[in-house]
Amino acid sequence: MEIKRDIYLNKLIERMHNGMVKVITGIRRAGKSYLLFNIFKNYLIDSGIPESHIIEVELDRYENKKYRNPENILNFIKTEITDAGDYYLFLDEIQLLEDFEAVLNSLLHTENLDIYVTGSNSKFLSKDVITEFRGRGDEVHIYPVNFREFMSVYNGDCYNGWAEYVKYGGLPNTVKLKNDNQKTDYLKRLFEETYIKDILERNHIEKIQEMNDLINVLASSIGSLTNSSRIESTFRSVIHSDISLNTIRTYIEYLKEAFLINEVNRYDVKGRKYIGAALKYYFEDVGLRNARLGFRQLEENHLMENIIYNELCIRGFQVDVGVIQRRIRNPQSIQEKKLLEIDFVANKGSKRYYIQSAFSIPDDEKRNQEKSSLLGISDSFKKIILVKDVIKPWHDNDGVLTMSLFDFLLGENSLDY
């Protein structure tokens, strides 16, 4: 069973021979290596590229340990290029290569060599490499399988598929496992033996319990407003820990660098500025989040919000949490100023969408509540409410589009309905 990853294949195709190093990043086990060494390689071969012109080095394999030395790998690549035709270099887990920035910069001078690398840590790749290349590094970030990709291999309807996806997420190996016990054991083991161990070792963390407690706090509060100071208060009052504010901030950065979590800022829509107080955190894979909490806190409304956020990121949007101030009448009919939240403000180029995630809208009161923040926006960008209810997309008299979650997730261009 092969899961098609056409989103990322097309991104690689668009970047062929652009004079840059294509840097494929993503959480461990998201499918980076398979994308490069199987899907993209097969595309090249089907396009007429001789297999001898595809140079592959998987640096995490023991037999390739010698190629972690800069001179050894440069000599190897040089001997593989035997004519003036186009060659394609695939380097897997590039962070294992000593002085990899210098090596890649050197390879960029080989005119007939198109370079693709993978890595699992954004500190090495998103930041250092892109900065080092000064415009000559091109990042392609791969996410776990989204719901549309998941349904392409799932044997059932979208409603049962959703129940599976919202619990176990979209890591490719998880999707391929056959039963609940296998999925549960795999995700729990992966979190402990790979992600946590990797973060602790890479960053030389000694306060192991505090890091574990922090992950639990973040996993329990997806979609909720928080910040480092609030988390510090939780540590002191609930966990009875004296961990410092700076340590919390540092540990959060480590989790972001490992692509476990994403941090979302609040944006004042009318004031057109960011509000630097509370933030939101979402997990890059909800299955890992659920596994971390022992599959006990499966609040479907919050998980739905997390999945919508990930989907918007996959589609290339810059996503913020929106805030707008409106005058609202209280039960005593007195107008009061109130800050209302818009779940997502999604921007890409000249496009913008305001999106509310509403698990269910059973009546007009709930609809008016969800619309309240959207109606306070004076610009003409599209305003959307996503619900898990089975409905046909429709626009109301205020121009707000209400759409089923499934139509949104399964339709590649659903936001343009």
Image (cartoon, helix red, strand yellow):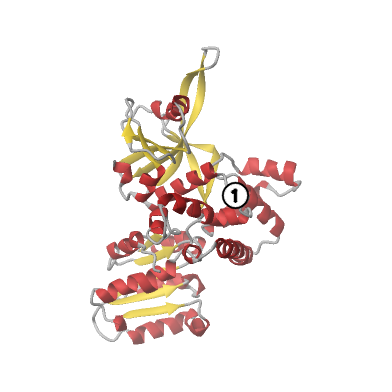
| In front of the other: 287 or 154 | 154
In the displayed structure, does residue 399 sit left or right of residue 129? left
Q: Residue furthest front?
A: 156
In the displayed structure, does residue 223 sit left or right of residue 138? right
Residue at the spot x=64%, y=48% of the render?
A: 217
Q: Residue 393 location in percent, x, y?
A: 33, 37
**Could you tell me if residue 259 is visible in this image?**
yes
- Disc 1: CA contacts within 10 A as few (<14), some (14-19) or many (>=20): many
Q: Is residue 115 above or below residue 388?
A: below
Q: Which residue is mark 1?
A: 219
The quadrant of the rendering that contains the N terminus is: bottom left
Report the number of discs: 1
In the displayed structure, does residue 270 sit left or right of residue 399? right
The quadrant of the rendering that contains the C terminus is: top left
| In front of the other: 253 or 304 | 304
Residue at the spot x=41%, y=33% of the render?
A: 272
Q: Residue 341 location in percent, x, y?
A: 48, 32
Q: Is residue 128 above or below residue 400?
A: below
Q: Is residue 85 above or below residue 36?
A: below
Q: Is residue 49 above or below residue 197?
A: below
Name the element at disc 1: helix
Q: Residue furthest top?
A: 333
Residue type at mark 1: give it: Ala
**Could you tell me if residue 106 is visible in this image?**
no
In the displayed structure, does residue 207 sit left or right of residue 52? right
- The image quadrant that residue 44 belongs to is bottom left
- The image quadrant that residue 156 belongs to is bottom left
Residue at the spot x=34%, y=59% of the render?
A: 7
Q: Residue furthest right?
A: 240
Q: Residue 383 location in percent, x, y?
A: 36, 34
